[in-house]
Image (tube, grey):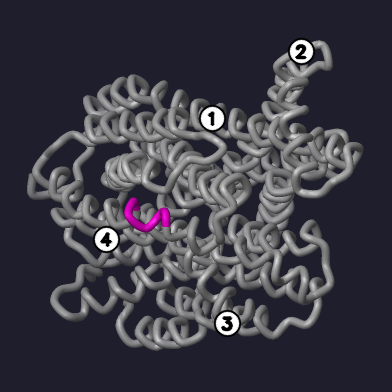
Amino acid sequence: MSFASSESLVEYGSRRAIITITAIFCALLEIVDTTIVNVALQTMSGNMGATISEISWVITAYAIGNVIVMPMTSWLAQQFGRRNYFAASIIIFTVFSFMCGSATSVPQLIVYRLLQGMGGGALLVTSQTIITESYPPEDRAKATAIYGLGVIVGPTLGPPLGGYIVDNFSWPYIFYINIPIGIIAAILTIQYVRSPKYAEKTKSSDVDWIGIGLLAVSVGSLQYVLERGQEDDWFSNTAILVLSIVAAAGLFFFIWREMTYRNPIVNFKVLKNRNLRVGTILSFVLGFGLYGSTYIIPLYTQQLLGWTALQSGMLMVPAALATAFMMPIVGNLIKKGVAPQYLLAVGMTLFFMFCFSGYSILTPDTGRDAFFGMLLLRGVGLSLLFIPITAVSLSTLKGMEIGQGASFTGLMRQLGGSFGVAIINTYMSRKNAGHRSDLVAHLSTDNMNTMQRVKQMQQGFMAKGMSADAALKSSYKSLEYGVMKQAAVLSYMDVFLMLGVMFLIFVPVVLVLIRRQKSAEPVDLSSAH
């Protein structure tokens, strides 16, 4: 497959502004929809008469749809033309947003979410490619900063927006709000976005249907395992065990197929570019931290502090604003020649400081003000990570390679988030059990302090009119609740520490890897430098 284009895709003036805004809104639509549903699960399960376990398939189905399409995005854009494919993806996403809101049963909703996710999978990667190619090489850092606003800010917008809609309207509107934006974006895409001129398309007889099947089965199975593993007790569950084997075997044969087939749907040869190889690893780490932290903070504030979804979502807004403020600054720093590895090292250090702050401040009743400083560190740290990672990944790619590279980094960021949430859930569950066991070991009837505490609580309950026996039972229940809450706090602290240590370990790794790469293959965001 060759990329034959003498015509530049660089845009200027109002046309570039319209294309940029369209692409950003499409990226936001896709990302916000990954988190907006989380806060509505309780309401949806009540309205549809389903359990939380059943309704959570709404999240799993969307994620599976995403990861199946992402690696094929560059190939599909070549087959149908980037503009046509992007517009079709927006329309599919919009139509199935309406269908999701109109669903009357859980199976219906799950199928519609899968199809919505397949439409959305293209939006994120293609938006990045469109924005990157709409700017001249010397302004690529600025383009990355603009795109980064959607990727980094998007996950934090979902919970507060979903909470507001559920509290003030009804759950179908979390899907209906996509419709007007989708219609406008589709019209603007058809009107303004241009497609690169590809030298050839794959003939229908040469389409790698086996590769497509292996990709769908392997990546879909992997995503299912990551989404459902902890809830289904991992490999003690037959379905999880079987699908893990299917995912591993499928990925092996898929990679072998794509490396040997004459018309692959995913071009692994682009990974010969060392910049991109380093960037895909760092994209995975970024996804792990971004989605992992976005997951645990609302969980902690809602489960342990008793906040509403809207309150916990609004907590993330200052950090999102800090990211939005820093993105253009980081883009300009890279444009002026600041080495990406130094920005990455600072960003990872700041993310470690954010995690260590979380480890330090968590208690069973932490106040809102305590989160402000740590979340600002997160916001600034993420801005110093996203742009340099994208700069390293895509800077030396040209033509169709940009879309292929964006597919890899987007997929790895998504999988990093999936692995992050799965690992965090498992780690937290096991740490929670361990901490509870340790705490209970110190609460025996032989312990004078414990019995004195029980007696005080019993007297308190009796003062409220309870009998002695009922008051004693309530005292033990209160003690058990206190143990569970303290164990949960300790497990959240452990998660923050784990995340922080992981990012701290990567500080020297980034400096060594990217410095070595720079000597062989310069990270050149600007042809003017």
Q: In this view, does 100 lie above or below 38?
A: below
Does the CB distance between marks 1 and 2 fall below 8 Å? no
Q: Position of residue 95 (x, y in %)?
A: 59, 84
Alpha-carbon distance for marks 2 and 4? 60 Å
Our reading of the magenta stretch's main secondary structure is helix
- Mark nearest the camera among 1 and 2 is 2
Which numbered disc flags the more N-terminal residue, 2 or 3? 3
Q: Where is residue 272 in the image (x, y as percent from the top left)?
A: 41, 36
**Marker disc for residue 447:** 2
Q: In this view, does 491 lie to the left or right of 338?
A: right
Alpha-carbon distance for marks 1 and 3? 35 Å
- Mark nearest the camera among 2 and 4 is 2
Question: Of the residues shown, which amino acid type is indicated by label 2?
Answer: Asn
- Indicate the quadrant where residue 96 lies: bottom right
Residue in the picture at 37% in, 38% down:
273
Disc 1 designates what residue? 493
Q: Nearer the viewer, residue 172 or 389?
A: 172
Disc 3 designates what residue? 169
Disc 4 designates what residue? 146
Question: Of the residues shown, which amino acid type is indicated by label 3?
Answer: Phe
- Mark nearest the camera among 2 and 3 is 2
Label 1 sits on a secondary structure element that is: helix
- Mark nearest the camera among 4 and 3 is 3
Which numbered disc flags the more N-terminal residue, 1 or 3? 3
Question: Of the residues shown, which amino acid type is indicated by label 1?
Answer: Met
Label 4 sits on a secondary structure element that is: helix
Which numbered disc flags the more N-terminal residue, 4 or 3? 4
Alpha-carbon distance for marks 2 and 3? 52 Å
